[in-house]
Image (spheres, coloured by chain):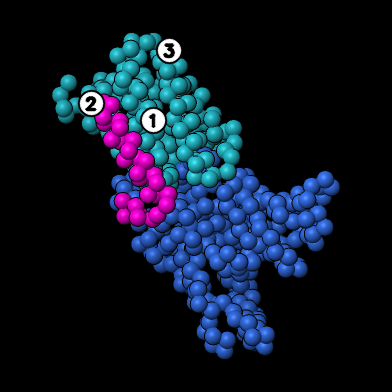
Chain colours: A cyan, B blue
Amino acid sequence: MTNNSAPLPYIFTLILAMAARIAPLPPILADINPDWVLLVLIYWSLATPEHTGVFSAWIIGLLVDVLTGRLLGQNALIYAVVCYFVVRLHKRIRHYPVPQQSVFVFFCLLLAYLLTYWLETLQGKSALSLHFWWPVFSGALFWPGVFILLRIIRIRG
Amino acid sequence: MLNTRLLVVLILSVALLVTDYKTDKLQPLRSALAYVVYPVQLLVNLPEDIYRFFNTSMMSYRKLKVENETLKRQQLINDVKLLKLAALEKENIRLRALLENSFKIGEQVLIAELLSVKLVPYEHLILVNKGSHFSVHAKQPVLDAHGVVGQVIRALPNESEIMLITDPDHAIPVQVNRNGLRTIAIGSGRMNRLNLPFLPNNADIQPGDLLVTSGLGGVFPQGYPVAVVDKFSVQPNKPFALIHATPTAKLDKIREVLIVWSHSTPVALTDEKPAMLKQDANDDK
């Protein structure tokens, strides 16, 4: 793989994911709106771990922090940790069938949302409702779609 | 290699988190990054913008004429009310002078438009299109035509984040307009409800009471409507009553908000300065 081939689809899909992250959806859909940026980052860490890894995930996380009004470093930390595990395990995960990857993605999202929960409560936020956890499930359900779509973009782009 | 990278990044993140939580030294960094993500926010806002553009430009002449006439009538009524207001204001200042009480008056407002984005699902944050370029800063009160909306919690160069009064982490000092009873209204996490958890069972409050800002706490100026009490039920075995109120501002329908600068120094008692109203230039829509 050449150096020039990776960045453009990578940036393009991440911008779309950021837009989807803050899309103004009706209340019920907003509750299950998963962390698209993390899903896309997981995909790229699986597909091209030599280009995308912990450090780029961290930078993207900083941007998402500003985008969603969190403390600087919150999403950066979470994305970096999740991408670390994905890059670590990418050789094995890549050979899993897509439904089985969904299970792996579920645990990635669970880790991410646990860390978010922990960091938010450390800041003295009042108890988050159960709705907070729905994106973990919806994200895992959306994974096959994300996987297929991004694969098309990667191969065409 | 990978491990050391993770370690570096973890240390950096924790350092950033702690600095950002304890101080506001990271504001320049956040502002710089805000320029990078601003296009994304505009992109998300684009469908709404296009819809509104077509909605206004495709309006028929007749409809516009009708709207214009109603607005003119409204304007007339408001003008008459304002005439009375000026007289009342003078009287109020005179009466307060008799009581040797200072009076805060003169607020500057800026109209800001909402960007239709949802920052995080579990918090009631909205984003408006005016930021520190318009010298908006944190802890400014935000109103709409019907009442208090919330307060600015972070000003970025081109936009600012506003926490609504219904956010579960927001509290606003209020008083009952009827009798001056002071308390605190706390957000419930639902768009149409505030909780008043600190009033005893025998408090003089009833459904229909208007709650206005009490001016305590220093963020919200005194006397703006906040909510109307809609439920008061005694809890015999608990120290406090169960009271719910509905915000008067149309929190789920607002398109435009007013960001307020309240002058922190009280005006002199005899000074007859008119209330300053700064209309924003681009409210031509």
Q: Position of residue A96 (x, y in %)?
A: 37, 10
In screen coordinates, is A137 left or right of B70? Answer: left
Q: Which residues are magenta?
A: B1-29
Distance between the alpha carbons at the discs numbered 3 and 1: 18 Å
Q: Position of residue B224 (x, y in %)?
A: 62, 66
- Which disc is residue A100 wearing? 3
Secondary structure of residue under mark 3: helix
> Height in image: B279 above or below B228?
below
Q: Position of residue B280 (x, y in %)?
A: 43, 67
Q: Nearer the viewer, residue B119 or A12?
A: B119
Number of on-image labels: 3
- For marks 2 and 3, give the one nearer the viewer: 2
Chain under label 1?
A: A
Q: How packed is label 1: few (under 14 Cα within 10 Å), some, or many (20 or more)?
A: many
- Give the labeled residue for mark 1: A38
Q: Nearer the viewer, residue B59 or B105?
A: B105
In screen coordinates, is A146 left or right of B235? Answer: left
> Height in image: B132 above or below A136?
below
Magenta-colored stretch includes residue A101? no
For the residue marked with disc 3, what is the amino acid? Gln
Chain under label 2?
A: B
Secondary structure of residue under mark 2: loop
Q: Quadrant of residue A115?
A: top left
Magenta-colored stretch includes residue B10? yes
The answer to whether marks 3 and 1 sit on the same chain is yes
For the residue marked with disc 2, what is the amino acid? Met
Distance between the alpha carbons at the discs numbered 2 and 1: 22 Å
- Which disc is residue B1 wearing? 2
Which of disc 1 and disc 3 is earlier in sequence? 1
Quarter placement of the N terminus of chain A: top left
Secondary structure of residue under mark 1: helix
